[in-house]
Amino acid sequence: MDVTIKDVARAAGVAPSTVSRVIADNPRISPATKRKVKQAMEEMGYHPNVTARNLASRTTKSLGVVLPFSADKALQNPFFPEVLRGISSIAHEMDYSLVLCTGETDEEMLEAVKRMVYSSQTDGILLLYSQVRDPIQSFLLEQKFPFVVVGRPAENGNHVTHVDNDNIQASKDITKHLIDIGHERVAFIGGSPELVVTLDRLQGYEEALKEAGISVEENYKVHTEFLKSGGRSAVRALMSLTHPPTGLVVADDLMTIGVISTLEEAGIHVPEDLSIVSFNNVYLAQVSRPALTTVDVHIQALGTEAAACLIENVQRREQPPKRIIIPHKIEYRSSAISRPAPSEV
């Protein structure tokens, strides 16, 4: 015999209307009651008719997640699976499913997002990146469609809910660490200058140098998406300067591992010949040789906070935009060592 809402209500000791509200994820039902009802549903093998419920409430109980490029490329970087882990934990807890959206170009990604919005595939959208002049953010704002950005919006920051680190301060802190241990010739390798995170980390690097009275050298700044081909030659060019850097700030752990590999091919050893610091503190940073001194940006927390904000926006559309900053912490490991004073060299 099929289990009904009335059966679940009787087992949980609540009214059938309360079970219906739990199924609809009504925010007025307490977490304790939701847990009790869900436990009864699970024990009795009750599965609500999701399709009928969604048609009635005009919700999909799904969230769109937009990656910055194709899934193949994005998921190679441990940052994205980790942030997805945070998003998934909240989505699962709140009974939302996830729909991944990718594309090779901005145009492809915009078209995919438009399909999600116009066909009502999702209740809201998470953007796992922020870039300058982003057509997707502009479209979502025009449509008044719920969305949250992981990162700092380049435009309309006061109108967009976003979850980020203070990447300018984080970059200042990690660059200052190299300066404090004796490095005056410090270079920077970042990703695409279209990405706001790259611009913020570059700004923090420059501010740290200026505050220490060290001039910012243009030929010490390199931008590359993947450290193959062009990236490899850029690193070699950096190290063949008349006065090569002794310290290097790299904007991403995965990129850093590529840098170290390129340096080893050129006979340059880390940290003996060149100290390197990085960002994100992915698992690879801990097990690489040498282990990376890196900024822990608490990736999973970025995902959980972003998902929680989006679900709140979906359920209560009148919510004002929020800016949530996740604190960062430097993990000191063996990829950066003190530079002897000139008289000691």
Image (cartoon, grey):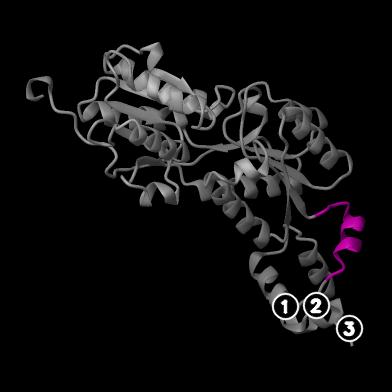
Q: Nearer the viewer, residue 321 or 181?
A: 181
Which image quadrant for residue 21?
A: bottom right
172 is higher (above) or lower (below) than 127: above
Q: Secondary structure at mark 3?
A: loop
Q: Residue at x 88, y 83 (%)?
A: 2
Q: Nearer the viewer, residue 222 or 57?
A: 222
Mark 3 neighbour density, 10 Å: few (under 14) some (14–19) many (20 or more): few
172 is higher (above) or lower (below) than 252: above
The residue identified by callout 1 is 42
Residues in magenta, as a range: 48-60
Q: Residue 18's spot in the image, x, y percent?
A: 79, 70
Q: CA distance from mark 3 to mark 1?
A: 14 Å
Q: Residue 141's spot in the image, x, y percent?
A: 76, 29
The residue identified by callout 3 is 2
Amino acid at pointer 2: Tyr
Q: Nearer the viewer, residue 120 or 224?
A: 224
In the image, is 86 to the left or to the right of 332? right
